[in-house]
Each structure stands twice: as C-alpha cells, then as structure tokens.
Amino acid sequence: MSGITGSDLVLDELIDLGVDYEVMPCDPTLADTANFCSSYGIDPSDSVNAILVAGKAREGQDRLYALCLVLATHRLDVNGTVRERLGSRKASFASAEETIHLTGMQIGGVTPFGLPEGADIPIWVDKDVLTRDRIVVGGGSRDRKLLLPPIGLLALPSAQIIDGLARVVPSPEN
C-alpha cells in the first residue's frame, strides 16, 4: 500500500458492495493510462479513466464536481455533456490538488470506490464502459489497479449511466 488516504476504504467498499474484483499490482511510475496499458498488456478499450471534473458555479455557490468514468479510447465531453449536467457556465478537469483533497487519491489511482465519507461526488459512467466484459480502473493509489466487470460500477449508490458523456477518439490511421 502506498499510504494514500482511501486505499483501505477502496477494498472495504468493494467487499461491502459484493463486487467481484481482482487487485492488479502496478509500478507507481507506470500508473498513468498509456504507460500502464503498454507495460501490462492491457487493451486501452478495457481501461477506464476516473476523471474528477469541476464546474464553475454561479456567484455565491461552491464549485461543482463529478467523477466521470470513461474508456481510455474515449474523450470526455467536458464542454458539452459534463458542463450541462453540472449546470455550470464552465467545466474543466479538476487540478491534482483538488483531486487529492476531494477523493484522497492521486491522479493515476483514482477510483469511484472508497471515496471519503461526506465527499458527496456524483459518479457518472459513460454508457460505452458497460459494453466491455471486464474493465481496469484505478485502485485508490498509484500502486494498484482493479479488474472487475463493468456492472460492478453500478453497485455504487451514486453511479449514473450517462449516454454521450464521452466520444470515441479516432485512431491515428483514420
């Protein structure tokens, strides 16, 4: 364990929810998606990025957040679907500092499982994630990933399936 806050909470929540999963140890220097997939032989179509997004709130309101889960082969529609769903004027990726503060996890290890109590962050799952047989998602720290059926994400009470949350990134040969 890397000592990142939330690591023990991740496995506890997976067990409490009855999600079938495997822990995949990961070299923390290879935790970012492209490096992880190429180093561990994972198809990027089976890799899911957990991205914390932030919306610029109306005056007098706090910033708005959501944790978006999208396939690594897709691009999150931050300026369209995300911004509209947040009800904000602008939306962007949350900073590394905001991500650690709100999730207790570093980028490269963020997962929707084991979020700190009171985080109250909606979890939005792109519809295409559910088309895969098994997915790999962050494990709460940069030194592990989780392998699970995508339906396991829906065991989370705040998870919502969102159509059009992300769009397929065209391959370079197209």
Image: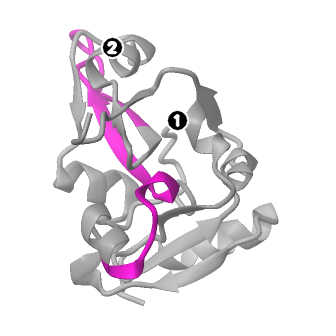
Element type where label 1 sits in the image = loop
**Residue ID at (69%, 68%):** 14
Residue 47 lies in the magenta stretch? yes
Disc 2 packing (10 Å; few <14; some 14–19; many ≥20): some
Amino acid found under the numbered disc labelled 1: Pro
Mark 2 and mark 1 lie on one chain; the one further toward the N terminus is 2
Disc 1 packing (10 Å; few <14; some 14–19; many ≥20): some
Residue topped by disc 1? 122
Which is more toward the observer, 61 or 136? 136
Which is more toward the observer, 37 or 97? 37
Residue 37 lies in the magenta stretch? no
**Residue ID at (21%, 30%):** 92
Q: Which residues are magenta?
A: 39-66
Residue 152 in the image: x percent, y percent? Answer: 72, 55
Instruction: Classify residue 77 as left or right of residue 20.
Output: left
Q: Quadrant of the C terminus?
A: top left
Instruction: Classify residue 93 as left or right of residue 48.
Output: left
Residue topped by disc 2? 80
**Residue ID at (36%, 69%):** 37
Instruction: Classify residue 161 as left or right of residue 119.
Output: right
**Residue ID at (37%, 83%):** 143
Judged from this view, the residue extending furthest toward the front is 173
Amino acid found under the numbered disc labelled 2: Gly
Number of numbered discs: 2
Which is more toward the observer, 95 or 143? 143
Residue 40 in the image: x percent, y percent? Answer: 40, 80
Q: Nearer the viewer, mark 2 or mark 1?
A: 2
